[in-house]
Amino acid sequence: MPGDRLTQQDRRHIAAGLADGLTYAEIARRLERPTSTVTREVMRNGGPADYRADHAHRATERRVHRRKTTPPAAAPGGADAFGRDPQTVREVADQLTDLLVQGGIPQMMAKVLAALYTTDTGSLTSAELVRRLQVSPASISKAVGYLEDQELIRRERDPRRRAERYAIDDDVWFQAMLASARANALLADAARQSAQTLGTTTPAGIRLENMSQFLSRVGDDLVRSAEHWRQVYSPPDRR
């Protein structure tokens, strides 16, 4: 029934709907479920191309079992400063994690990024991340290094605790877009040089030159678009 957990039969209906080319909204209407429930279920379990009902059901049962046997990271009960149930915040972070993983970010890195995004301060220390995610300090260190390389987070000093904090800010996706554009520009240059080496009139050379032109044009458009929308969505005092 709506509001309950998805059953194995529900998941088989989802798989059948995906096979028939139905949208998430259409599948959700047939199940009398929110579209977000179906979207999250599919994205968490392989995406529309790899969703398997029985595998998804077993994976969900394992996750539920882990939650029941793992002690909570924070004291139970009580709303946060904005009146939100901590469980609701965790569910939002879990959903964001799943979508980031589907977007290509490794799972632990996605968990750290989601934790930072769903924290009102926008920053956490390594110890806070360890407690929040219930993982080892080494896992946090590796994830932080990756996210820094991608320019998705930054380090800042917390003078009160004499510890480093890992933070996101309003420019995080702008900086990430620029980093992506720089990586594409390097690849475009390499493709152009390879085309010249192999001969620009040969099939391989033409293919590489087309690749170079595509990446260059898209990169230029990406930077212009990122700069425009950064101005639109930046706080007034930062424009």
Image (cartoon, rainbow, N blue to C red):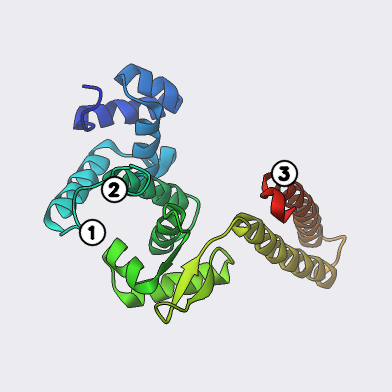
Quadrant placement of the N terminus? top left
Query: Which of the two labelled residues, at mark 3 and mark 1, occupies the earlier sequence position?
Result: 1
Nearest the camera: 209 or 239?
Answer: 239
Residue type for callout 2? Pro
Q: Position of residue 126 (x, y in %)?
A: 38, 73
Q: Compared with residue 69, is residue 24 higher up or lower down, i.e. above or below?
A: above
Residue that label 2 marks: 86
Q: Identify the element where label 1 is drawn.
A: loop
Q: Any mark on residue 235, and which? A: none
**Marks 3,1: beta carbons within 8 A:** no
| Residue shown at the point (27%, 42%) measured from the top left | 56
Circle 2 residues within 10 Å: few <14, some 14–19, many ≥20? some
Residue that label 1 marks: 74
Q: How many marks?
A: 3
| Residue shown at the point (53%, 66%) measured from the top left | 153
Query: Which of the two labelled residues, at mark 2 and mark 3, occupies the earlier sequence position?
Result: 2
Q: Is residue 45 visible?
A: no
Q: Is residue 225 left or right of residue 84?
A: right
**Marks 1,2: beta carbons within 8 A:** yes
Residue extending furthest bottom? 162
Q: Any mark on residue 232, and which? A: 3
Q: Compared with residue 93, is residue 34 higher up or lower down, i.e. above or below?
A: above
